[in-house]
């Protein structure tokens, strides 16, 4: 579905992405792991049109999408969430969802709300859609809460919800589990699996929580120093001594060993 070929993104002399090549298969939940600074978020930013690549190519279903703008990719069904959630804090959860179809396509809120041609029916449809999304994510009870009051995990769920307001095909999730408690992380994981199975979403997921990656993702791609180091099933990756020792650090290696011995 997505093919990344020999992608480079340099910031001055620094090679954040340094010749990465990878495929994200249609219908997969592909994991992307690697130490901090490996270039994972930069790779996402280049794929999602936030940064122009220094060189290299990105295709989606065979079509060259290299360097397209985020809103152009959005219309092709390619969406991303951010490592730091970026909700509109003073608006309610439901209003945040209702912002998405216009907000991401580059229109202003005021155009969307009051502009010519925007009729009450459309707004009603948007409201219905938002309520469906909230129901799907099991957070209907939060619909009138100000988004700024949500916990970190609830904000991540809202980010995922934003991708459901449109016809997404592939969604890139950056550290969807960061700062999220176990219960909410399970809710997020369940929502990802259901979106994948029931609605055909393809996912690429950056996450440090290896339990989460192991449960959801196949394959798992390992990045280090701007390059793809390894790819395989979660089991293969976690057994790959070189990957674990050299790139994920001794702490994680010991954790995996301890878990294996239990
Ligand atoms: N806009 C930027 N300008 C300069 N350096 C950047 C920029 N964005 C990221 N980097 C650098 O690129 C490297 C990779 O960052 P990042 O892609 O965020 O890694 P990861 O998400 O794997 O932790 C880091 O060393 C980071 O400091
Ligand atoms: Mg990152």
Image: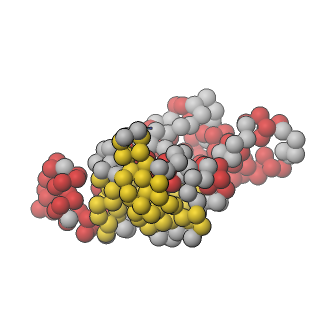
* Residue 8 % position (x, y): 42, 53
User: Total number of numbered labels?
Assistant: 0
Q: Residue at x 55, y 57 (%)?
A: 66
- Horizontally, residue 3 falls left or right of residue 210, namely right
The answer to whether residue 189 is visible is no
Residue at (79, 38) in percent of width and height: 111
The residue lying at 45 percent from left, 63 percent from top is 5
Classify 105 as above or below 114.
below
Q: Which image quarter holds the C terminus?
A: bottom left
Q: In this orientation, which residue lies closer to the viewer: 61 or 205?
A: 61
Residue 110 is left or right of residue 189, and the answer is: right
* Residue occupying image coordinates x 29% and y 60%: 229
Q: Quadrant of ligand 1?
A: top left
Q: Position of residue 9 (x, y in %)?
A: 43, 48
Is residue 68 found left or right of 196 in the rendered image?
right
Residue 8's place in the image compared with 152, above or below, is below
Residue 57 in percent (x, y) is at 50, 60
Give the colour scheme of this rendering.
secondary structure
* Residue 15 vertical position relative to residue 167 in the rendered view, above or below: above
Residue 232 % position (x, y) = 31, 69
Front residue of 87 and 221: 221
Q: Is residue 253 left or right of residue 39?
A: left
């Amino acid at each position: 579905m997505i093919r990344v070929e020999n992608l480079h993104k340099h910031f001055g002399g620094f090679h954040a992405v340094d010749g990465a090549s990878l495929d994200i298969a249609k219908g997969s939940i592909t994991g992307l792991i690697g130490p901090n600074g490996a270039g994972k978020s930069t790779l996402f930013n280049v794929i999602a049109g936030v940064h122009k690549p220094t060189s290299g190519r990105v295709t989606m279903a065979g079509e060259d999408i290299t360097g397209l703008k985020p809103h152009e990719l959005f219309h092709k069904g390619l969406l991303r969430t951010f490592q730091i959630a970026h909700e509109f804090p003073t608006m309610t959860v439901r209003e945040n969802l209702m912002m998405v179809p216009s907000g991401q396509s580059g229109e202003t809120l005021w155009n969307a709300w009051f502009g010519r041609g925007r009729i009450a029916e459309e707004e009603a449809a948007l409201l219905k859609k938002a309520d469906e999304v909230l129901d799907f994510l099991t957070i209907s009870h939060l619909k009138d809460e100000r988004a700024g009051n949500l916990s970190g995990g609830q904000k991540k769920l809202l980010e995922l919800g934003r991708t459901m307001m449109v016809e997404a095909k592939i969604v890139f999730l950056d550290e969807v589990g960061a700062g999220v408690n176990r219960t909410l992380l399970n809710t997020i994981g369940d929502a990802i699996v259901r979106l994948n199975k029931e609605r055909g979403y393809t996912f690429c997921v950056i996450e440090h929580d290896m339990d989460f990656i192991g449960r959801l993702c196949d394959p798992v791609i390992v990045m280090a120093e701007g390059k793809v180091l390894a790819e395989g099933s979660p089991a293969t990756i976690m057994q790959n001594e070189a990957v674990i020792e050299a790139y994920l650090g001794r702490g994680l290696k010991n954790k995996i060993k301890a878990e294996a011995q239990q």
